[in-house]
Image (spheres, grey):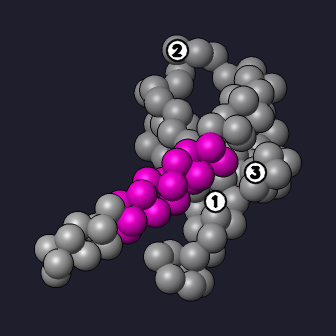
């Protein structure tokens, strides 16, 4: 009986973890097009872009890291150290775009 309850508990927790991860993926996947459009509007030469990563940024409150606060697209470049960061809300509305360290994009703030 104990083994059965342990397996049942494990199955329930596993499905909960999968649902949480799947929900997080849907948020970043939904905003991926908006982030890609924001990057495309900057007319950065394609050969300059090394990689684009889209990540969920959590508010850090609550159990398990909290809720998703916003989504960020991070662009790595071939020609500089640093990134272009495109932040959008969970409703996929653009919030802020900036570059970091050595990387520069015309018309974009650098920190």
- Nearest the eye: 11 or 58: 11
The image shows residue 58 at horizontal and vertical percentages of: 58, 68
Note whether 63 is above or below 110 in the view shown.
below
- Nearest the eye: 48 or 37: 37
N-terminal label among 3 and 1: 3
Local secondary structure at mark 1:
loop
The image shows residue 75 at horizontal and vertical percentages of: 55, 37
> Which residue range is magenta in the image?
12-27
Number of marks in the rendered image:
3
What is the crowding at mark 1: few (fewer than 14 residues within 10 Å), some, or many (at least 20)?
Answer: few
Residue 25 falls left or right of residue 3: right
Residue 47 falls left or right of residue 2: right
N-terminal label among 2 and 3: 2
Local secondary structure at mark 3:
strand
Check if mark 3's residue and mark 1's residue have beta carbons within 8 Å: no
Note whether 91 is above or below 48 in the view shown.
below
**The stretch drawn in magenta includes residue 109:** no
Which residue sits at x=46%, y=63%?
16
Q: Tell which tag, 1 or 2, sits nearer the viewer.
A: 2
The residue wearing badge 1 is 111
Note whether 65 is above or below 15 in the view shown.
below
The residue wearing badge 3 is 88
Rendered image quadrant of residue 11? bottom left
Residue 78 appears anywhere in the view: yes
Instruction: Using the numbered discs, state the Cα–Cα distance from disc 3 to disc 1 in whole angstroms.
Output: 18 Å
The image shows residue 27 at horizontal and vertical percentages of: 66, 48
**The stretch drawn in magenta includes residue 17:** yes
The residue wearing badge 2 is 47
What is the crowding at mark 2: few (fewer than 14 residues within 10 Å), some, or many (at least 20)?
Answer: few
Work out which residue is located at the far front of the displayed protein and give it. 1
Note whether 58 is above or below 50 in the view shown.
below
What is the crowding at mark 3: few (fewer than 14 residues within 10 Å), some, or many (at least 20)?
Answer: many
């Amino acid at each position: 009986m104990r083994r059965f309850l342990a397996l049942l508990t494990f199955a329930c927790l596993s499905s909960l973890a999968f649902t949480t991860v799947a929900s997080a993926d849907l948020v970043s996947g939904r905003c991926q097009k908006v982030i890609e459009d924001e990057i495309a509007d900057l007319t950065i030469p394609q050969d300059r872009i090394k990689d684009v990563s889209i990540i969920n940024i959590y508010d850090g409150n609550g159990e398990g890291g909290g809720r998703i606060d916003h989504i960020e697209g991070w662009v790595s470049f071939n020609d500089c150290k640093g990134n272009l960061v495109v932040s959008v809300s969970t409703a996929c509305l653009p919030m802020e775009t900036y570059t970091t360290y050595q990387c520069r994009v015309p018309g974009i703030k650098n920190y």
